[in-house]
Image (cartoon, grey):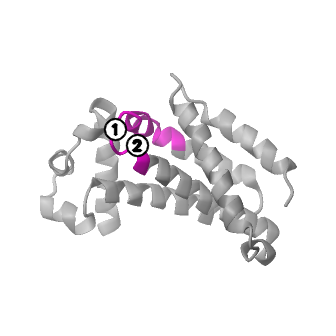
Amino acid sequence: MSSKTKDAIVSAFLTLVESEDFDRITVTDLVEMCDISRQTFYYHFDDIDQMLCYAFDKETVQIHTAHESDIWTSYAEDYVAFFNKFDVLMRKSLKSISFVLIYKLITKSFADCLFAYFNYKKGEQFATAKSTEYLITLLSGAFSSLIVSEIQKEKSDYADVFGKLTAALTDFTL
């Protein structure tokens, strides 16, 4: 039941962000839209930022557990859907005090999935290598910058970004 409530709150936020400024959405707006009490919201989340962390983490876990393999295209297809789903949220966050949080969530999401992908592809030798954390941090930071560049455009083409990334990862050997 609590997962359904959490998901309903996230869904309400995604709906509200379509028509409201990112920073103007309040807990009151969310509880009214979900027809729940403030206590229910605060039972699940400390604040809206924690709700956003939950939303990104949930999507990330779904992607990398659904594709426990070394085939990047399966990850990429789900990431395109994920970023299309959160497109308006990410766009509106550009003008928000929460932009840094959204940037960090994108970076963390990608780092988690990239680590899972390389771990399946390269195995234990990759996971325990000294340079692994640095490599993942470098790649996920660069990727987040590409996504920010993409959401600054009038119309984002996440499939193109992930297509280029897929080509690069296919050519890339560790």
* Residue lying at 59% horizontally and 62% vertically, measured from the top left: 112
**Residue 143 higher or lower than 37, as above or below:** above
The answer to the question of whether label 2 and label 1 lie on touching residues, with beta carbons closer than 8 A, is yes
In the figure, is residue 169 to the left or right of 49?
right
- Residue 30: image location, x then y, percent: 21, 48
**Distance between mark 2 and mark 1 Cα atoms:** 5 Å
- Assess disc 1: are there few (<14), some (14-19) or many (≥20) residues with their C-alpha within 10 Å of its C-alpha: some
Quadrant assignment, res 167: top right
Which residue is nearer to you in this view: 100 or 23? Answer: 100
* Magenta residues, dominant SS class: helix
**Residue 55 higher or lower than 146, as above or below:** below
Disc number at residue 174? none
- Assess disc 2: are there few (<14), some (14-19) or many (≥20) residues with their C-alpha within 10 Å of its C-alpha: some
- Residue 173: image location, x then y, percent: 86, 57
* Residue lying at 74% horizontally and 67% vertically, measured from the top left: 131
| The C terminus - image quarter | bottom right
- Residue 84: image location, x then y, percent: 52, 38
Does residue 164 appear anywhere in the picture?
yes
Which residue type carries mark 1? Ser
Q: Which residues are magenta?
A: 83-101
Is residue 99 a member of the stretch shown in magenta? yes
Is residue 67 a member of the stretch shown in magenta? no
Which residue type carries mark 2? Phe
Disc number at residue 99? 2
Which residue is nearer to you in this view: 39 or 171? Answer: 171
What residue is disc 1 on? Answer: 96
The secondary structure type at the circle numbered 2 is: helix
* Residue lying at 72% horizontally and 74% vertically, measured from the top left: 127
